């Protein structure tokens, strides 16, 4: 299957969204006083009121016209102060209004006497979204730069009006029109860049800053070196406390070994779709890099990665190939239309803002070929160790540079970075975050006197949206209670690394007091169910919502499982070659209920297994009867599954905040 320009752009979005972008627009003139906002109850957001503010499209006057900013307000429950919290979403290109309710929950400690303002930044959501047909047409990979060039031409002269500096001026216009004296700026990822640049430009208007997954306004990192450098501490934490014992002693070295192989030829193997049909799949160096990056937002992917890489190195590519499809949202098979992501990134806006204001290693006035030559020259001047465990060619292929080299700039060059005010500041960083590493948070904290930095273990990007420990929410509560946010307590990784996938029944250790093939078959049965649960959890987190009735998953070695609102059906589902499960679990209130499974296959001790409601499995395999307490079963020494939760849950708590980049 050829890679399309749309696919390439989406791959860029995976790792570049939230990456550091240095402001390239000059400080515009002070925004003129705006007409007062008139709010009315929103039709779709309970408790919020809505208004639209028209602002100049181009404050320099070079391009005529206005653009409307859709704003939603949640008024303070107590006597309101003259301050408001402004929520700034990620991207660039993500609308904030779809996240209004979730934002109100996570920032609730700030809302006692402050209103909450949420608005779609210009060019996103309901605030004049940008669109480029050039980015929607099927183009081969080599034409991605041409697609960006055509997109710029389609947007026209106004493409210089979608910079961070214009969004900063929009925030100030909203403040004036809504009548607030001070703002608490709550930004996530790219939203922190907007918040920081507002604080540089309007320090007198800032009451406080809450920065989640920081994009510093003063960092130039066009090749994402900070991301590559962050991989070592990320893998070290993932495998700390001997969590990878039995899997690998050097997970980052494993990635380097595999990347070296992929540099010569792509990984190739097979995956099974939700109907049990087999398909050939491949994985390249860029795919592997994107897969690692996808773990920023999905801890289930991180948990599966070390063993999947080790399997690929041992000649079993299928676990990693399946994991890659899961990270791309191609697993499971869904009934009807695909799930709509709450992220809702406007791809044209992302391309516009990124190409207009990013700090690239070339002259802005240079022609495309000269830009590419300068960019490649800058890349070759860097030591190869900067990109370990990958190489410079992978960094280039995965970056936005080849595309933006053909984007004709109209926005002015960036202004000098200004000082930040000594306003109370809380900075949240995930220790597992690659796209906005903790080093970025530390750099910004050093610029703000008294800034509080809280690093959350085993947590990736968009901390308040992905922290399962509650530490980040506790820090927000303490911060708005005028207390010092405390470091996170030592905790266990809720998504520890999973064991290496067995390739044959002979490698499966017998359980349940059964010896020989029956005991190994029982272990394979339990492994199959647990593997399915991991896939469901991973897909649920990837989609950021419960999966629709009728979703189906292919087995690693064949067959499939289909989930409906009333049943989970297994159809010759296979996780270990030669062992297949068939049967139906009734589903009640999102939980699996007891079921009888038929076990067959060329390697299996055939028979039946009853999964009961009391944490026991019983039945007959290979003519031997058994009755096993699952609380005493460990299926592997590494990442051993906790079997006490049987029957499994198919509904998982939604994250505190939808994916904010």
Image (cartoon, rainbow, N blue to C red):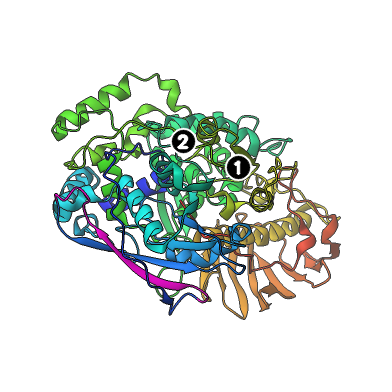
**Residue 555, visible in the rendered structure:** no
Image-quadrant location for residue 385: top left
Position of 78 relative to 388 (above/below): below
Left or right relative to 525: residue 161: left
Name the residue located 56 percent from the left edge and 37 percent from the top edge.
314
Q: Does 414 sit left or right of 366 as displayed?
A: right
Compare residues 322 and 540 and report the one nearer the observer: 540
Q: Is residue 62 visible to the viewer in this orientation of the structure?
A: yes
How many circles with numbers are drawn on the protein?
Answer: 2
Near-viewer residue (20 or 168): 168
Circle 2 crowding by C-alpha within 10 Å: few under 14, some 14–19, many from 20: some
**Location of residue 112 in the rendering, given as x and y in whole percent from the top left corner:** 62, 62
Q: In whole angstroms, how far apart are the C-alphas of marks 2 and 1?
A: 44 Å
Q: Is mark 1 on a helix, strand or loop?
A: helix
**Magenta span of residues:** 46-62
Residue identified by numbered label 2: 420
Q: Earlier in the sequence, mark 2 or mark 1?
A: 1
Mark 1 — residue? 307
Looking at the rendered structure, the secondary structure element under dot 2 is loop
- The question of residue 60 being in magenta is answered with yes
């Amino acid at each position: 299957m050829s890679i399309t320009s749309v696919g390439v752009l989406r791959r860029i979005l995976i790792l570049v969204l939230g990456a550091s972008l240095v402001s390239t627009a000059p400080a515009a003139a002070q925004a003129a006083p705006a007409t007062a906002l008139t709010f009315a109850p929103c039709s779709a957001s309970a408790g919020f009121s809505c208004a639209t503010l028209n602002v100049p499209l181009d404050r320099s006057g070079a391009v005529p016209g206005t653009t409307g900013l859709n704003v939603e307000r949640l008024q303070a429950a107590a006597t309101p102060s003259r301050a408001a919290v402004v929520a700034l979403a990620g991207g660039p290109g993500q609308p904030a209004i779809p996240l209004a309710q979730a934002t109100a929950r996570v920032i609730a400690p700030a809302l006692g006497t402050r209103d909450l303002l949420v608005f779609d930044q210009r060019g996103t959501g309901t605030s004049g979204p940008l669109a480029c047909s050039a980015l929607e047409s099927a183009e081969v990979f080599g034409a991605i730069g041409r697609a960006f060039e055509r997109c710029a031409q389609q947007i026209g002269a106004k493409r210089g009006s979608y910079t961070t500096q214009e969004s900063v001026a929009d925030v100030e216009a909203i403040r004036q029109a809504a009548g607030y004296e001070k703002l608490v700026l709550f930004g996530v990822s790219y939203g922190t860049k907007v918040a920081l640049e507002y604080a540089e430009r309007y320090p007198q208007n800032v009451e406080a800053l809450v920065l989640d997954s920081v994009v510093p306004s003063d960092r130039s990192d066009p090749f994402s070196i900070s991301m590559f450098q962050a991989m070592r501490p990320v893998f070290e934490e993932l495998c700390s406390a001997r969590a990878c014992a039995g899997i690998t002693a050097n997970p980052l070295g494993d990635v380097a070994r595999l990347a070296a192989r992929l540099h010569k030829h792509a990984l190739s193997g097979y995956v099974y779709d939700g109907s049990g049909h087999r398909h050939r799949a491949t994985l390249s160096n860029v795919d592997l890099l994107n897969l690692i990056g996808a773990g920023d937002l999905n801890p289930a992917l991180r948990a599966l990665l070390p063993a999947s890489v080790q399997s690929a190195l041992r000649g079993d590519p299928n676990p990693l190939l399946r994991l890659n499809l899961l990270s791309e949202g191609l697993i499971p098979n869904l009934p009807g239309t695909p799930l709509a992501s709450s992220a809702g990134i406007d791809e044209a806006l992302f391309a516009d803002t990124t190409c207009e204001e990013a700090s690239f290693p070339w002259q802005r006035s240079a022609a495309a070929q000269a830009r590419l030559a300068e960019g490649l020259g800058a890349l070759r001047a860097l030591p190869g160790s900067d990109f370990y465990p990958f190489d410079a060619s992978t960094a280039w292929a995965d970056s936005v540079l080849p595309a933006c080299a053909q984007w004709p700039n109209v926005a002015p060059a960036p202004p000098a970075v200004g000082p930040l005010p000594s306003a109370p500041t809380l900075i949240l960083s995930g220790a597992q975050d690659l796209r906005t590493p903790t080093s970025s948070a530390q750099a910004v904290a050093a610029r703000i006197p008294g800034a509080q930095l809280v690093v959350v273990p085993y947590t990736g990007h968009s901390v308040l949206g992905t922290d399962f420990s509650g530490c980040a929410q506790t820090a927000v509560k303490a911060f708005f209670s005028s207390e010092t946010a405390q470091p996170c307590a030592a905790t266990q990784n809720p998504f520890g690394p999973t064991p290496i996938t067995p390739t044959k029944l002979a490698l499966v250790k017998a359980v349940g007091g059964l010896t020989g093939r029956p005991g190994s078959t029982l272990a394979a049965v339990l492994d199959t169910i647990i593997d399915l649960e991991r896939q469901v959890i991973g897909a649920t987190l990837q989609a950021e919502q419960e999966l629709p009735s009728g979703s189906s998953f292919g087995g690693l070695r064949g067959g499939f499982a289909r989930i409906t609102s009333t049943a989970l059906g297994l159809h010759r589902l296979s996780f270990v070659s030669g062992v297949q499960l068939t049967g139906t679990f009734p589903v009640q209130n999102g939980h699996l209920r007891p079921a009888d499974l038929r076990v067959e296959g060329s390697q299996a001790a055939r028979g039946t297994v009853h999964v009961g409601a009391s944490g026991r499995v019983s039945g007959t395999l290979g003519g031997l009867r058994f009755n096993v307490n699952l609380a005493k079963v460990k299926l592997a020494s590494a990442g051993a599954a906790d079997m006490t939760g049987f029957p499994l849950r198919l509904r998982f708590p939604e994250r505190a905040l939808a994916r904010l980049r």
